[in-house]
Amino acid sequence: MRQSTALLSVVAAFAIAVGGAWAWFHFLPVAASHDLRFVVRQDIPDHEFRSEPVGEHAQRILATTNLINGVFLSQEGHRFTVFVAEWTAQDGATMSVVHHTPDVCWVNVGWTPRDLGQPGRVDIPIGGHVIPFQCRIFGAPGGPAAELVLWCTLVGGAVLEESDRWQTEDPEALGGREAAVWASRRIGSNQLLRNVAARRTGSRDKQFLRFSVAASTDWAADLQRLESFAVRWIEVRYRQRSTDSSTSIQ
């Protein structure tokens, strides 16, 4: 009798856990008033765009071939490096495809995070929306050059923000690859917590957008230059949700 009761308790606990998790994501999920989408331009006045191919190995890691990678060269001599990746709901069925932020990938190949007083996040008004971008400065491997980089991730039309309380680990203390592993773990943990709280599943369409400029001793001027470029490069579109579940592209 005791064994039967214990077995029923285990089965009931399992059913509640599974059913509760399903209900959390599917029963009255948190709905945004609109879905955002990034559209980037390859023709910017006074800028020349040079496309750069992405290798097959990188494409396999990213699990998509829907990529834009290259540099914009301005007439003033500034270089803006850009990268965009997109996944459909079928292609990017898990959240792992958007773990490949500069905190992970750049550190993994030898770039070193630098704190020059720059913010960890900047908000840029684009097309009537204020979009939050992660902000970092990385020193190039084996040299004095540095890069100021901004990036943003959309999952199911909503910005997937990263927690400001997380700091990039010191790759000199841990070793570059170990620091990248720790960064990947904290990004995954952060994404899990935020998506559970928002009742947002990983089986949604995704976009990742990154752009950067050479960093100087005046990071504020570099950031202003990068923000000005963002407004010219990025177009933000949205799909307005109505009460009858129909949508319209704005």
Image (cartoon, rainbow, N blue to C red):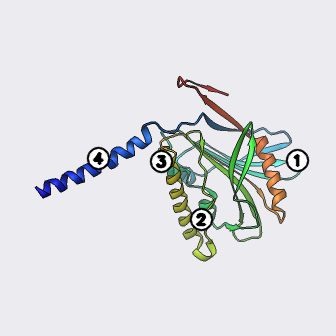
Q: Are marks 2 and 3 in contact (CB under 8 Å)?
A: no
Q: Are marks 2 and 1 in contact (CB under 8 Å)?
A: no
Specify the farthest residue to the bottom: 173
Q: Nearer the viewer, mark 1 or mark 3?
A: 3
**Which residue is the site of mark 4?**
15
- Looking at the image, tell me whether mark 2 or mark 4 is earlier in sequence order: 4
Specify the farthest residue to the left: 1
Q: CA distance from mark 1 to mark 3?
A: 41 Å
Residue type beneath disc 3: Thr
Residue 75 image label: 1
- Looking at the image, tell me whether mark 2 or mark 3 is earlier in sequence order: 3
Q: CA distance from mark 2 to mark 1?
A: 33 Å
Mark 1: which secondary structure? loop
Residue type beneath disc 4: Ala
Q: Residues within 10 Å of mark 1 (few under 14, many from 20)?
A: few
Q: Are marks 1 and 4 in contact (CB under 8 Å)?
A: no
Q: Quick one: 135 or 17, which is closer to the camera?
A: 17
Q: CA distance from mark 1 to mark 4?
A: 63 Å
Q: Residues within 10 Å of mark 2 (few under 14, many from 20)?
A: some
Q: Quick one: 130 or 62, which is closer to the camera?
A: 130
Residue 246 x/y as whole percent:
55, 24
- Residue at 84% of width from left, 53% of height from top? 78
Q: CA distance from mark 2 to mark 4?
A: 41 Å
Q: Nearer the viewer, mark 4 or mark 3?
A: 4
**Which residue is the site of mark 3?**
94
Mark 2: which secondary structure? helix
Residue 122 x/y as whole percent:
72, 53
Taking 246 as reference, is 212 above or below it? below
**Which residue is the site of mark 2?**
108
